[in-house]
Amino acid sequence: MYVKVIIEIGVKAVDKEYVYKVPTAFLDKIKVGVRVKVNFGTQLLEGFITEIINNYEGNILVRDILEVVDDTPILNEEMFKLADYLVNKTLCSKISAFQVMLPKALKAKNKTNMHKKFNKYIVLNSDINQVNDYIASCKYNSQKEILNKLLNEKKVLITSLSSGIKTLEKKGLIKIIEEEVYRYNIIKDNDFKKVSLNSDQERVVEKIISNLNISKTFLLYGITGSGKTEVYLEVIDNVLKEGKNAIMLVPEISLTPQIVQRFVNRFGNNIAILHSGLSDSEKYDEYRKIKEGLVKIVIGARSAIFAPFDNIGAIIIDEEHTPTYKQDETSPRYDAKDVAIWRSKYHKCPLILGSATPSLESFARAGNHVFELLTLTRRPAGSVLPQVHIVDMKEEVKRGNFVFSKLMTDKINEKLGKNEQIILLLNRRGYSSMITCSDCGYVEKCPKCDISLTYHKTSNTLRCHYCGFYKKKTDKCSSCGSSNIKDYGMGTQKLEEELKQKFPSANIIRMDMDTTSKKGAHEQIIKDFGRHKYDILVGTQMIAKGLDFPNVSLVGVLNADMSLTIPDFRSAERTFQLLSQVSGRAGRGDIQGEVIIQTYNNNHYSIVFAKNHDYLSFYKEEMKIRKSLSYPPYYYITLVNISCKDYELGFAHADKIGKYLRDNLEKTTIILGPTMANMFKINNVFHYQCIIKYQRDNKLSKVLKEIDDIYKIESKVNVSINVDPTRL
Ligand code: ADP
Ligand code: ZN
Ligand code: ZN
């Protein structure tokens, strides 16, 4: 017997399947989808068996398989088919498609060995009368204590073997057992009460559950706080009743502990949780819970879409407009939404995309009846959408108000006076964004990247937010030595400092990447703010998502322009989404919420429509622009990124690729570039890009594949292809 084995070789992930011979000792262990160890050249590698061949006719000497790693297959039939889909759709290598579906512990060629963790317990090993007799006659208190405890608790966790335990075990009165521990646990709230759905929610749930055995995509467009999460919970309840499983994706789970809590309250420990904050062994634990059928629900970020359930009854993607559902940085550059649609077809189950601000692509598909639109237009239980004020900062600056407009200051004081809470958003971390010399104009920049360094006051360092480079801040200009240096721009650190000065009685907490790097720090801040330990929460966009604090009556956006000025055709859409999301954090309880947006672009349509909570008008306006500029959803985009350490060589290849695309793609396809990418130099590597815009191009896959094949063997230049990128 022979097998084909796929292995991962080198960074450029060239797909290789090789034939190996199966020694007789392994014959009954060989299955498609198990991992095996093989020699390749001089290396010892792991790979997956992709095919079993009975007769091998080739005349090359084939080597033996050295070891079979798994008893049961890691890859099943669905995963093989899904891998084919990913290869086709994203032009990734097949091995990388397999690897992305698995936790690190199960990837081929994994070096670190993950061990299951076991706890030791003692339990009684004889009948109760015998135990009671022993207690009555025994003169050792420690032994009596152990037995009494066991009579009460049946099973007791032990951390070491005391002499008492050893004696009792020898006498056969107790025995020691081992049980596997799953390392991640959330506990139910005791005071949890289930809400009953209102008629709007019921209508939506009815529609979905009458389609539980059909592959169909619903777009649930519901304003913030309209009760979408309650709808998800109810749908999942119905899925479980059918004996099926559910997957729910959230943008970044460590940012949404409140949602996880609601799921745990409702479904207890029937849930596995997958997210980037878990250690590799925790991820492996969660994966095994799913695979072994110990849980019926998975909640997780992007990669949880690959959860290895074999009987999915519904897939839910919350905040479907979030760009992080697309993996842009590394291959496979897949979109979890596409994978969700694929799996919903495979399992014949509904997919629910939920958002208060659907992506233009999804809303357009709902308009074309590719998706079915469901809407929730009211907030339950009387709470209304907040009133939004726009403040023109051009005017404020004239009055000397650079950071806080008069209205912002007044409202903060007013809310503090009423003992209500405030959330302030500033989408830039660090202290200030730029350090400039007033004498020579020198700007401190990252030596490896093309951007200015951000000053971080707490560590007194200048930091690059792209590559992580940092250096100590000095009081002199690095170029001319002048001590006349100034910092410009405001980050969350500086804002926190200014707030403390201006509102000395308020308790302030900051939430950004710098204050949440420690495990659990994020959850702690949210918990503390929820208990009103703080009056003001200051943070970057991570505070905009999914948080539900009933006592927050004011949300302030310090600088709404930051996301508008990013050079990307989606910047207006992102701005509208961010402002709508963050506004949705205000007035979620009984008190009326207010929102203040400070901006220099007070007439920009994305800001005005966000103020009016008017998604439909925003959608119409933005669609007009997309149409006139041939952007999605009217056109598809594929990005070809060419990167090289050598500036000239990089450009030469980018130019060649641009020409190749123009010569070989269909005439209706638009090719822009090559141009310098927005971030041209990152970590000493230069980036060029070609943008391909098309409605339909039958030659595209073939041409992209040709480019990919050429540059797989070109070592100095790296070419990456990103189909449907989320940003340019
Ligand atoms: P969304 O997910 O759309 O932002 P949520 O499901 O988080 O909305 O609901 C917002 C708030 O309203 C939550 O505090 C939730 O408990 C509450 N809520 C939702 N549905 C109902 C209902 N039918 N009756 C009472 N309260 C509800
Ligand atoms: Zn200088
Ligand atoms: Zn850098």
Image (cartoon, grey):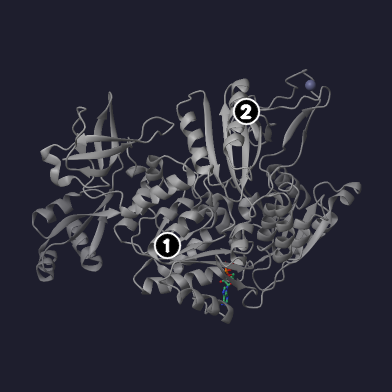
Q: Amino acid at mark 2?
A: Asp
For label 2, count other residues whose C-alpha is less than 10 Å away and answer few (under 14), some (14-19) or many (20+).
some
Is 455 located above or below residue 599 in the figure? above
The residue lying at 74 percent from left, 57 percent from top is 624
Q: Position of residue 487 (x, y in %)?
A: 76, 33
Ligand 2 located in image quadrant: top right
Q: Estimate the x, y position of residue 360 in percent, counting from the top left.
A: 64, 58
Q: Position of residue 641 (x, y in %)?
A: 58, 35
Q: Which residue is mark 2?
A: 655
Depth check, front residue: 222 or 634 = 634
Is disc 1 placed on a helix, strand or loop?
Answer: helix
Using the image, determine if residue 420 lies above or below residue 648: below
Where disc 2 sits, the SS reads: helix
Residue 715 seen in this snapshot:
yes
Badge 1 or badge 2: first in the primary sequence: 1
Left or right of residue 413: residue 275? left
Classify 677 as above or below 139.
above
Looking at the image, residue 349 sits to the left or right of residue 691; the answer is left
Nearer to the camera, 294 or 631? 631
Tag 1: amino acid: Lys
Q: Is residue 552 above or below residue 517?
A: below
Q: Which residue is mark 1?
A: 345
